[in-house]
Image (cartoon, rainbow, N blue to C red):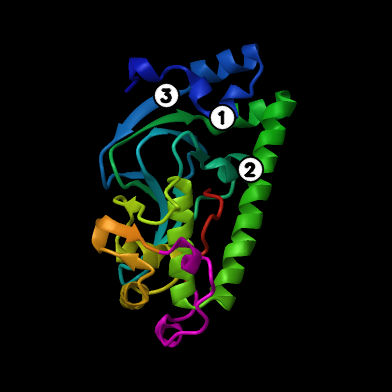
Amino acid sequence: MTPPDMRDIDRFTLLARLEPDAKQHAAAALRWRSYGAGEIVMGPDEDSGDVFFLSTGQIFAVHWTADGREIIFSAIPETGYFGELMAIDGVRRSLSVYARTPASLAIMPGGIFRELMDSSPAFRRAVLIDLARKVRDLTERNCQLTTYSVIDRVKAFILRFAAEASRLQPGALLPELPTHAEIAAHIGANREAVSRAFSTLRRQKIITGSGRGLQISDPEALMTPFGSDEDQADSGHPHHLPAAAVR
């Protein structure tokens, strides 16, 4: 499917860096597709090698355990891309990617992606910078898993979410905050531990409200480490590798 209002590849930061001739070549190679909420975009062990560019919607890269538990590795931002690792090294994919909401994507064959890396220094450098950023982000968040309690990880999640939405101020409402189960899958905990952390933050009057109507009462307190908590013991071993590059 090719939505007429999404043909301009300058919407995608990575592709906007291309030289005019290379950009025209990339635009001609893209195919567009829409996905419904819950639809699988890319599965593990897939060998297509395509690279996906997200135009609109919300996409999660996940792993499902044998007992059906969902582990979220990363949320793909709009105008972002994923699937580049397989295009680069040819190794089969290891994660599933699905549309959390209706989504529109542009899909580039892996061969074209490699051609652009070979022919465009600006494109190649942008890809390498993105990979370096993902490695640093992964390192930082893995350190959080080993040194932060569940409540501190919840506080860090709220902080990041509020900052990205430009709502990190007293009284700010966060209507689109993910569910406790989704937050647990992001931070390497279980839903019950996350729910207890939220209850503690409410008792401390750091936040008010519940569900998707959460309100920040004390942003400064969110930035202060809480220390150890009783949830740390029952959170289980870390099972989340956030911000990993998606094959």
Characterize the magenta stretch by its predominant secondary structure.
loop
**Residue 174, percent from left and from top:** 33, 53
Q: Which mark is residue 13?
A: 1
Left or right side of 121 for 137 = left
Q: Residue at x 33, y 57 (%)?
A: 178
* Count of marks overlaid on the render: 3
Q: Quadrant of residue 66?
A: bottom left
Residue beneath disc 3? 31
Q: Residue at x 42, y 80 (%)?
A: 235
Image height of 209 relative to 101, above or below: below
**Residue 133, percent from left and from top:** 65, 49
Instruction: Give the position of the N terminus as an image quadrant.
Output: top left
Left or right side of 168 for 89 = right
Q: Amino acid at mark 3?
A: Arg
Q: Residue at x 67, y 29 (%)?
A: 123
Magenta residues, as a range?
A: 218-238
Residue beneath disc 2? 130
What is the secondary structure assignment of the residue under circle 1? helix
Residue situated in front as seen by the camera: 9 or 114:
9
Q: Is residue 237 magenta?
A: yes
Name the N-terminal-most of marks 1 and 3. Answer: 1
Which one is closest to the eye, mark 2 or mark 3?
A: 2
Q: Amino acid at mark 2?
A: Asp
What is the secondary structure assignment of the residue under circle 2? helix
| Residue 90 in sight in this render | yes
**Residue 238, percent from left and from top:** 50, 75
